[in-house]
Each structure stands twice: as C-alpha cells, then as structure tokens.
Amino acid sequence: MEDNKKTLLEIEDLDVIYQTDLETVHAVNGISFSMKQGETLGLVGETGAGKSTTALSILRLLAENTGKIRKGKILFNGENILDMNKLELQCLRGEKISMIFQDPMTSLNPVLTVGKQIAEVLELHNQKHLSAHQIEERVDEMLRLVGISSERKHDYPHQFSGGMKQRVVIAIALACQPQLLIADEPTTALDVTIQAQVIDMMEKLKSQLNTSMILITHDLGIVAEICDNVAIMYAGEIIERGTVYDIFENEDHHPYTEGLFGSIPRLDDETDRLKPIKGLMPDPTRLPEGCKFSPRCPKCMEICKKEQPPACRKGTHEICCHLYRKNDEK
Ligand code: SF4
C-alpha cells in the first residue's frame, strides 16, 4: 500500500466482552489495527477468535443486553464511533460503512422485492436528494453491476439462488458507495464455484468504487487472492499481522499461523493426511495466563504459560510470540 493514502479506520486497544448473569465472555482482548483508504484487510481466524465481534463493534451492532465495549477507540476518518449518538450512527451505517453478513438467506426480507430492498437503502440515505426516478435508475445500475438483469428487480428473494441472493446483498451494501465494506465470511454459505464468482465480483466492484474492505474469513486462499494486509486473530487477540507478502512468503510465523497453513490440504502432500491444529480454542470465559495459544502450541516454553508474549516487529511484519523476542527491532 502507498503510505500517502489517508488512514480510514484506526482501532486502538479494543476490548469487548459479553456479560451474562453467570459469566463473562472475553471476546476481544485489546486489539489495535489501522487501515488506509482503498485497502483490503483480511481478518483471519477460527470460529470464536473474535473476528465478527470486532466487525459488529465497528458498527456498534453488538447485542444490546450482553455485548459491552469495555475500553478502546474506533476512529473512522478521525471520529470515534464509540462517542457517536443514535443519529450519527444511522448516518454511518449503510452510508459510510456497510456490512455483508455470512448468510444471504437470512439477510434479505422475504416479503419485499429485491428492487425495493436496494431502493430502501438509497431512500434512507438520500444525501444527494435523488428523485424516485433516479433511485429507480440507481437500482437498475446496482443490479447490473453485480451481474443481475435489472428486469429481476420485481422478483422476491425466494426466486433467486444462494449466489444470486448474495449478489443482491452486495448490491444493497454498495448502493450508497460506502467508504468501508465489512464482509463477514461472505461466501461461507455458498458452494465452491459460486464462491469464486462472488469473490471475483467483490474484488472488481471494490476497485471500481474505491471502497476499503475488511474481509473476515478462515479461508487463506481467498486472503492471498484479494487482501493487501492480513491480521490473524486467536482468542480475541491479533497474534500476527503484516502485508499479504509477509504472511504468505516469509518463513517466520506464529505457531498458530503455521498450524493454519499446515491444515490446508495440498495436492503434492504424499502422506494424504490433513494436519489439524491439535486441541480447541480456549474457553473465552476462562482464558489461560500468558500466551492464549500455549495449551495447543507444540513449541510452548515455560515463559509462555506465565507472560503475555510481546509484539515482535520486523518491518511491516509483527508476531506476538516469545520465540521471536530476539528479532524484535523495537
Ligand atoms: Fe507458542 Fe510460546 Fe509462541 Fe505462544 S508464545 S505461540 S506458546 S511459542
């Protein structure tokens, strides 16, 4: 990424919990990252790593009764989203930051035509004071952009396949030309051939509209294809980050990232066996002391069980692991 691009989003020391009567779930534990305009950031990790909670926090969409942002800042264009009032949040959501959820089947309203659903977001954020006719034209344009004939705007979601529904969801998300698009596992619910088409289309649209994107996924293949930078999350922390080159070409990695790469099936692997990461993600209500990955780490040392590993930096590449302490340039 060019350094002269403006910083769009800056997250500082974000800490999010889910509080119930019985327990406290530590979902996001003091993460910080920033991204520039036009950048695509891949947020990677297993289920329960805190990726979706991070995304929901950005839009202040955490469950009202249980989700709590305990500390941190989320600066969007320099303004702290956590200080915004209801009206400011309404202007932000959909207009400046949009989100695509995992499952297109549940993202669309079954009783409204897809055209009406795209028009709705344009009517709600009608900053340019578009007339009804202009909104209609914009609906047609958005449908064409995502590869759907504008004649189908009168159809209902059940008349579309899963891949087509996700295209409609993308059209809704991009209708107001947001500065940031958060895509939370946008292809998980789709079959493999459709996944490739949707990812290809999102990439084209993103560069056409100069939208920044946070892509939440556990699929490293997709990350390699479309991301500029990558942050790997584990147990609510970012344990490794860097450019896509740092993550895919460097030999040094956090043992968890090594495990993620090791569990990708390879055609040239003669053993014919997958190498899963042993064990499970720790219970977020009782996170271990020191390194959160220590109970599963094949390289665990005594210090790992007591001390939180520092962030060790080499250029743009940062790894939070005691193994790399000597390499730390700081
Ligand atoms: Fe493994 Fe220790 Fe590094 Fe954690 S800090 S990943 S336990 S080597």
Image: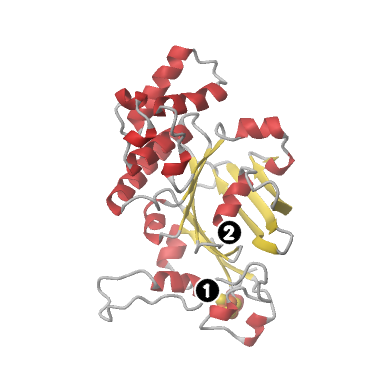
x, y (%) of residue 38? 49, 42
In the picture, the disc for residue 51 is none
Residue type at tag 1: Leu
Local crowd size for mark 1, using a 10 Å CA cut-off: few (<14), some (14–19), many (≥20): few
Residue type at tag 2: Gly
x, y (%) of residue 26? 67, 63
Q: Secondary structure at mark 1?
A: loop
x, y (%) of residue 122? 50, 24
Local crowd size for mark 2, using a 10 Å CA cut-off: few (<14), some (14–19), many (≥20): many
In the rendered image, the vertical position of residue 130 relative to residue 272, given as above or below: above
- Report the quarter where the C terminus lies: bottom right
x, y (%) of residue 140? 36, 23
Nearer-N-terminus badge (2/1): 2
User: Does any portion of residue 65 appear in the rendered image?
Assistant: yes
- Residue visible at 36% across and 47% down in the picture: 199
Ligand 1 positioned in quadrant: bottom right
Is residue 44 left or right of 143 when viewed as pictured? right
Is label 2 or label 1 in front?
1
Residue 172 placement: quadrant: top left
Which residue is at the front of the view, 281 or 200?
A: 281
For disc 2, the marked residue is 50
Q: Is mark 2 within 8 Å of ligand 1?
A: no
For disc 1, the marked residue is 280
